[in-house]
Amino acid sequence: MSQSINPFEMAQKQFDSVARQMNLDPSIAEILRWPIREYSFRIPVRMDDGSIRVFQGFRVQHNDARGPNKGGIRFHPAETFDTVRALAMWMTWKCAVADLPLGGGKGGVVVDPSTLSLREKEELCRGWVRAMWKNLGPRTDVPAPDVGTTSLMMGWMMDEYSKLVGQYTPGVFTGKPIGSGGSLGRTEATGFGVIYTVREAMKHLGIDPTKSVAAIEGFGNVAQYAALGFVDILGGRVACVSCWDHRAKKAFTYSHKDGVDPHFLMTIVDEYGTIDREKAEQAGYIVEDGGAWIAKEADVLIPAAIEGHINAETVKLMSKRVRIIAEGANGPVTPEADEYLKQNGIFDIPDFLCNAGGVTCSYFEQVQNDMNFYWSKDEILKRLDEKITSAFHDVLETSLERKAYMRDAAYIVAITRVVNAMELRGWLTGSF
Ligand code: GLU
């Protein structure tokens, strides 16, 4: 995480600038620039060595005008109230831009999950639910996986909640394992969603996907399926992936003279997105410093790690060939870098549009949980493609009509929908 940028200030800055462009009533803006509710709690866990360690937990509910709060839980050592606030706010815009009947929320725990045993992780997950369960529910607030959390963890959390309320309640968490209320396609959904937006951007810009090259930052869930989709769905080449190595405590960039093979790399990556460096080198991969990815000759950059990595300094390292930035991560581009992209005519697909595939499939998961009837993977990926493609075109149309930068256009679409829901519910005449 970049030390210099406070993500919540960045989220508010982006919002304020669009609110001004839209002439949004300042009192409505004041509601939206802060979360409606915030929870901070301590989670004691009995560790394997018999000691007790106390973890800091958070949940932030930004806005629920359009439906239950929705958004993941991150387990990250640099988590703060402000990172969670920013991410919760972005979830409100993400659900609105994808036109899902959901609001925005986010949770977190200050922890490096790679330092915990499986049992300790389970205790921490169950402890998080015991602290928050009264404020969660399929009609209230529905968490999901994010950086540092997995589908297995969502299964434990759903189980803990179900025990506490005394009935099986699969719709309270999404991203659960298949066979325990999870949806087919959820694992692929965020990365494939990124690729659907890249495909539409390429059509708009007249770029041939089969002649295109991508450089990807990250190799966690989003980056893995974005890489796979770039090769298998678009027929393009992936020049490199860069990933955090939790053993070396630094990032490395992996490239290969024939382009990286995401299928192979997915066989040598662990659950935290760390590639086995030795095995990669044996297979002919070139390993460089983690920052090298951004300077690779590529048409498309896909930052799919964490926030603030394309900033005032790194943006200038980008190759002149780059035409599209597809924000797989939440908040990867800082406002200073945004200015550079605008001035250089680079087409940016903003995070809350680009990576909306995950929450869209989460919504499908909830619908299936509610019906207790499950769709096939083909059906889900088809619906996902339709939803993401239509969201992309809603934003593109607004961007062309108003001559607005894509991020600003996405904000305009999202804010308009949220304010409309607030208005229709009577919130703007005083009944909150
Ligand atoms: N954590 C993911 C995101 O940032 C998914 C959220 C969800 O499925 O609720 O979009």
Image (cartoon, grey):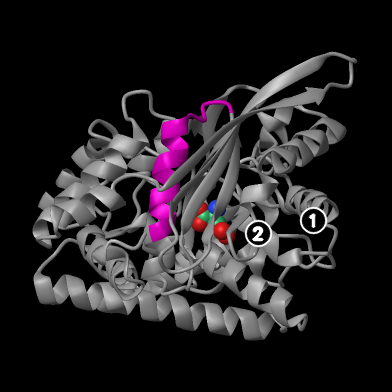
- Please rate how many residues cluster around mark 1, counting C-alpha atoms within 10 Å: few if below 14, some from 14 to 19, many from 20: few
Q: Which residue is mark 1?
A: 165
For mark 2, give the secondary structure: loop
Residue 89 in the magenta stretch? The answer is: yes
Q: Quadrant of ligand 1?
A: bottom right
384 is higher (above) or lower (below) than 191:
below
Image mark for residue 399: none
Q: Nearer the viewer, residue 192 or 320?
A: 192
Residue 260 seen in the current view: no
Q: Which residues are magenta?
A: 77-92
Q: Nearer the viewer, residue 347 or 154?
A: 154
Q: Residue at x 37, y 23 (%)?
A: 3
Q: Amino acid at mark 1?
A: Val
Residue 84 in the magenta stretch? The answer is: yes
Q: Is residue 85 left or right of residue 395?
A: right
Image mark for residue 137: 2
Which of the image's four quarters has the N terminus? top left
Dominant SS in magenta: helix
Q: Nearer the viewer, residue 163 or 198?
A: 163
Q: Residue at x 81, y 34 (%)?
A: 123
Contact, CB < 8 Å: mark 1 with mark 2? Answer: yes
Residue 328: name its quadrant.
Answer: bottom left
Residue 162 in the image: state x and y as whole percent. 81, 57
Q: Amino acid at mark 2?
A: Gly
Residue 203: name its quadrant.
Answer: bottom left
Q: Of label 1 and label 2, which has the lower sequence position?
A: 2
Residue 84 in the image: state x and y as whole percent. 47, 39
Q: CA distance from mark 1 to mark 2?
A: 10 Å
For mark 1, give the secondary structure: helix
